[in-house]
């Protein structure tokens, strides 16, 4: 069977219209023939194959992320274990250079690849943080003033990352900033200041949870607070040169701040209103919120009990039971 194209059909209809018009003229009809409208043909070529979104997501969310992670870890290892042939300041310079490159590349690609840009920014902040610490190690911290300058610089970096994370409304950058601030507390390693900063991390966790509404931020921040505190309470073994594991003598500060962490983290219940989402209703959100607060109270109570036994405080069994009840109530109220 013969196949006709659209243009051939249109030409045939036009010739047929002309014949009918001439026939009408011979018969004395005064009708005016109207030309048939030509259909609008799509002038844009249609691609034979559209981009595969699944492959695109794998490239952006996995391969790019793994590449960023490997580059960041490589720079961190270079700064932590510099090659002997290099000048001691070279690793810090490399760290700053790579960090600046990542940051500007993230700015360049943020419109098209937002996920990639966020991870580039996060990696650049981490590199800047550790490059700054390494630079101060090279300069030498022989005076109290130099140590305070380093501590202030690291806290400033953490604060700037926190501000930027709120500007971009990114839970990932929130987690990065909380981690950097908590790590700064361990670097400072002065009891009152360290514990006050960890308490500040707990407050920032509640703030981030309030404004993002994401349970993952609350869970990560809570675990970070307790883990960093326990690391400090056991003598800060990873950052103390050759000191090893040893329970800190400040039992009062240790136990008091553990209670404060739990109170702050559980306070989100008093003013956070569950918001239903597409996946869950208000009741499910409320159950999830109470479950997290209960878990927070129990974790705080367990940490408190562990430190009670490690400090070997005499005649405190009744006080310990009372405090565990306080933690449990904080989780339920």
Image: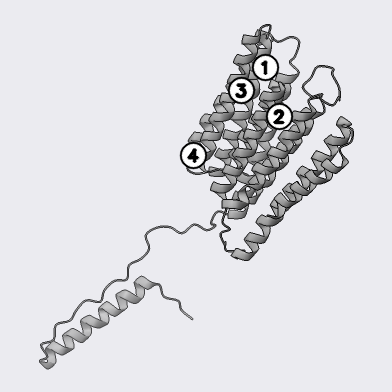
User: In the displayed structure, does residue 1 sit left or right of residue 36?
Assistant: right
Q: Quadrant of the C terminus?
A: bottom right
- Mark 3 and mark 2 in contact? Answer it, CB < 8 Å: no
Q: Looking at the image, is mark 4 or mark 3 earlier in the sequence?
A: 3
Q: Which residue is mark 3?
A: 154
Residue 97 x, y percent position in the rendering:
58, 21
Residue 8 x, y percent position in the rendering:
35, 73
- Mark 2 and mark 1 in contact? Answer it, CB < 8 Å: no
Height in image: 23 above or below 217? below
User: In the displayed structure, does residue 2 sit left or right of residue 21?
Assistant: right
Which one is closest to the eye, mark 3 or mark 2?
Answer: 3
Q: Which residue is mark 1?
A: 134
10 Å crowding of disc 3: few (<14), some (14-19), many (20+): many
Residue 127 x, y percent position in the rendering:
63, 26
Gap between marks 4 and 1, in whole Å? Answer: 28 Å
Q: Secondary structure at mark 4?
A: helix
Q: Residue at x 56, y 56 (%)?
A: 273
Q: What mark, if any, has residue 73 been given in the picture?
A: 2
């Amino acid at each position: 069977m013969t196949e006709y194209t659209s243009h051939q059909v249109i030409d045939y209809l036009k010739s047929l219209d002309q014949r009918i018009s001439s026939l009408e003229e011979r018969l004395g009809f005064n009708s005016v023939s109207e030309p048939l409208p030509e259909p609008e043909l799509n002038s844009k070529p249609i691609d034979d194959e559209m981009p595969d979104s699944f492959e695109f997501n794998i490239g952006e969310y996995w391969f790019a992320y793994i590449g960023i992670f490997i580059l960041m870890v490589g720079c961190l290892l270079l700064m932590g274990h510099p090659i002997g042939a290099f000048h001691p300041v070279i690793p810090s310079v490399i760290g700053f250079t790579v960090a600046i490159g990542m940051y500007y590349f993230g700015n360049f690609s943020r419109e098209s690849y937002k996920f990639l840009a966020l991870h580039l920014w996060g990696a650049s902040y981490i590199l800047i943080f550790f490059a700054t610490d390494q630079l101060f190690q090279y300069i030498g911290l022989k005076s109290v003033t130099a140590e305070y300058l380093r501590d202030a610089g690291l806290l400033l970096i953490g604060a700037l990352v926190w501000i930027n994370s709120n500007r971009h409304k990114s839970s990932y950058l929130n987690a990065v900033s909380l981690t950097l601030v908590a790590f700064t507390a361990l670097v400072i390693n002065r009891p009152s200041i360290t514990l006050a900063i960890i308490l500040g991390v707990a407050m920032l966790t509640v703030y981030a949870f309030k404004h993002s509404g994401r349970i993952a931020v609350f869970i990560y921040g809570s675990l970070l607070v307790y883990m960093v505190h326990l690391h400090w309470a056991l003598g800060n073994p990873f950052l103390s040169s050759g000191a090893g594991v040893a329970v800190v003598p400040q039992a009062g500060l240790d136990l008091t701040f553990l209670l404060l962490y739990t109170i702050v983290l559980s306070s989100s219940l008093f003013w956070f209103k569950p918001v239903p989402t597409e996946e869950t209703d208000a009741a499910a959100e409320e159950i999830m919120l109470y479950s997290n607060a209960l878990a927070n109270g129990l974790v705080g109570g367990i940490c408190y009990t562990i430190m009670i036994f490690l400090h070997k405080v005499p005649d405190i069994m009744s006080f310990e039971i009372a405090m565990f009840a306080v933690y449990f109530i904080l989780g339920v109220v």
